[in-house]
Image (cartoon, rainbow, N blue to C red):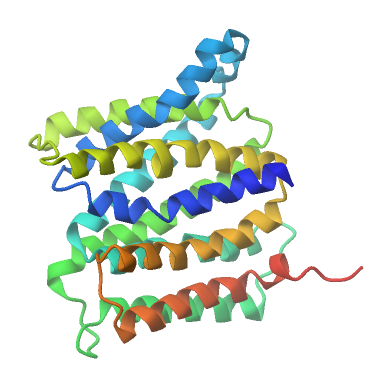
């Protein structure tokens, strides 16, 4: 129970990812990623300094490092890019299609079957997404937000893919997340220096948003999720992750980073409801 609750705390923290990113000002995506992941590595570094005997956890096969860094670096760069190039609520909801994609993807793994409710859930989720990317009732994606929408979609696929692949690394210690964060920070810094112009936060509130981003949604949440997935009830955590888009949207609306119009409300219900429907086997266990 304790490990499951720790894992669920990651879902709560991820609900603030869009808010902190939107409130961080005009810091370029790679620069923001470099700063956030440098901060995110601090909790793990503190543990490794205090417990030197745990440093051996960083000695992992190349495939573990490749999967971890590709997942963290790819997901957050795409997420930051989406929020910089599309409305925060829209981009956040599209990016949070990852729980649905995890359910559908896991159903295609060996020993599993893709059932009717998986397909129905996927249709509902994409119907909700369609409401966001069609303006004025038309079928043409607004050119103004095209880059942001594409990045948000890729973001969802990146995290769901990383999550499915990471299941095969269940014996890898959570301490390795520290290394993932450090490597992602360095890669982000290199990309920033090559591709972007440095823009620092301009106000105290923007600095606080960057610090909050690095400590919680980009930091402690990854350690908590890794610990919960490996030691807690994976089915409960999988179902709980579908609450993330709803929590995230509520947080953004309360902070006035979006308007609670009918499209947002219906899209939120379709995406969240579709994910829950697709996860029916995880939520309602069959009696044996």
Image coordinates for residue 166, horizontal then vertical, percent:
58, 42
- Identify the residue shown where x is 56% and y is 17%: 59
Specify the quadrant of the image occupied by residue 18.
bottom left
Asked if one can make out residue 97 in the rendered structure from this viewpoint, the answer is: no
Give above or below for 62 relative to 121.
above
Specify the quadrant of the image occupied by residue 106.
bottom right
Comparing 135 with 217, the one in front is 217
Asked if one can make out residue 96 in the rendered structure from this viewpoint, the answer is: yes
Image coordinates for residue 12, horizontal then vertical, percent:
50, 53
Q: Is residue 249 left or right of residue 227?
A: left
Image coordinates for residue 117, horizontal then vertical, percent:
63, 79
- Identify the residue shown where x is 42% and y is 51%: 158
Report the quarter where the C terminus lies.
bottom right
Specify the quadrant of the image occupied by residue 239.
bottom right
Q: Is residue 183 left or right of residue 269?
A: left
Q: Is residue 127 left or right of residue 107?
A: left
Number of numbered markers = 0
Image coordinates for residue 231, horizontal then vertical, percent:
71, 40
């Amino acid at each position: 129970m304790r490990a499951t609750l720790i894992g669920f705390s990651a879902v709560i923290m991820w609900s603030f990812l869009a808010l902190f990113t939107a409130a961080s000002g005009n810091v370029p995506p790679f620069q923001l990623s470099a700063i956030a992941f440098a901060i995110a590595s601090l909790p793990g570094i503190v543990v490794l300094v205090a417990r030197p005997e745990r440093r051996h956890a960083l000695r992992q096969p190349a495939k573990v490092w490749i999967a971890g860094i590709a997942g963290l670096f790819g997901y957050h760069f795409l997420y930051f890019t989406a929020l910089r190039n599309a409305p925060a609520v829209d981009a956040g909801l599209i990016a949070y299609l990852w729980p649905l994609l995890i359910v559908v993807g896991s159903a295609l793994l060996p020993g599993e079957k893709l059932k009717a409710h998986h397909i129905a859930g996927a249709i509902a989720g994409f119907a909700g997404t369609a409401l966001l990317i069609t303006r004025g009732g038309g079928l043409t994606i607004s050119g103004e937000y095209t880059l942001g929408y594409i990045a948000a979609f890729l973001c969802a696929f990146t995290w769901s893919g990383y999550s499915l692949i990471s299941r095969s690394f269940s014996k890898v210690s959570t301490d390795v997340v520290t290394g993932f964060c450090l490597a992602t920070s360095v890669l982000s810094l290199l990309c920033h220096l090559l591709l972007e112009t440095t823009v620092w936060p301009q106000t105290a509130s923007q600095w606080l948003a960057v610090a909050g981003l690095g400590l919680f949604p980009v930091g402690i949440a990854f350690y908590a999720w890794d610990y919960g997935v490996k030691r807690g009830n994976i089915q409960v955590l999988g179902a709980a992750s579908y609450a993330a888009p709803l929590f995230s949207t509520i947080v953004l609306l309360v902070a006035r980073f979006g308007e609670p119009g009918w499209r947002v409300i219906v899209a939120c219900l379709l995406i969240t409801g579709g994910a829950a429907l697709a996860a029916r086997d995880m939520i309602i266990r069959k009696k044996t």
